[in-house]
Amino acid sequence: MSKENLFRRADFITVHLQLSPRTRGLIGAADLALMKPTAYFINTSRGPIVEEAALLDVLRNKRIAGAGLDVYDVEPLPLDHPYRKLDNAVLTPHLGYVTEDNYRAFYGQMVEDIRAFLAGKPIRVIKPR
């Protein structure tokens, strides 16, 4: 499916990309203008993948139903940022992966990694390509 057709047909558009020179500004005004007025835009990847001014425009003018944002061009999101004034945006402070279970796993594995390294038997080693 083409990007244009996806934006026209989807009820939800979610962004799952790394920020790179290739993906910076990947989603702009022309893309967002294709979305249905009942559609939602969700970005939990990186703010600059989406042209912020274009997203603000479609949200302010209610051309889409709303947005869920966990990432921004500037983090933490400034207190006076226009996103904070919107009634059709759910904003969270870039914590999509933060759960008690994740912290238990990450910190537990970190301790295991350090102990194994100090014992001369590293674990979870990333092999070079």
Image (spheres, helix red, strand yellow):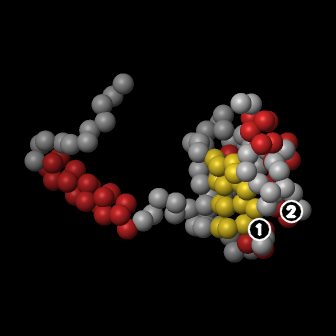
Horizontally, residue 118 falls left or right of residue 45, namely left
Q: Quadrant of the C terminus?
A: top left
Q: Could you say where residue 114 lies in the image, as x and y percent from the top left?
A: 20, 53
Tell which of 19 and 44 is nearer to you. 44
Tag 2: amino acid? Lys
Q: Could you say where residue 61 lies in the image, as x and y percent from the top left?
A: 89, 62
Vertical comparison of 37 with 117: above or below: below
Label disc, if present, on residue 115 of the rendered structure: none
Q: Name the residue: 32% across, 57% down.
A: 106
Q: Name the residue: 17% across, 47% down.
A: 117
Query: Can residue 47 be seen in the rendering of this structure?
Result: no
Q: Name the residue: 26% across, 42% down.
A: 124
SS under mark 2: loop
Horizontally, residue 59 falls left or right of residue 75, namely right
Residue 4: quarter of image: top right
Q: Could you say where residue 123 lies in the image, as x and y percent from the top left?
A: 21, 43
Answer few, some or many: residues within 10 Å of disc 1's Cα (few below 14, many 20 plus, some between 14 and 19): some
Query: Can residue 71 be seen in the rendering of this structure?
Result: yes
Whole-angstrom CA distance, mark 2 to mark 1, is 8 Å
Q: Could you say where residue 68 lies in the image, as x and y percent from the top left?
A: 67, 61
Q: Quadrant of the N terminus?
A: top right
Q: First in sequence, mark 2 or 1: give its number.
A: 2
Answer few, some or many: residues within 10 Å of disc 2's Cα (few below 14, many 20 plus, some between 14 and 19): some
Q: Name the residue: 30% across, 58% down.
A: 105
Residue 91: quarter of image: bottom right
Tag 1: amino acid? Asn
Horizontally, residue 116 falls left or right of residue 72, namely left
Vertical comparison of 1 with 64: above or below: above
SS under mark 1: loop
Q: Which residue is mark 2?
A: 62
Q: Could you tell me if the residues under marks 2 and 1 are in contact, i.e. CB atoms within 8 Å? A: yes
Q: Which residue is mark 1?
A: 88
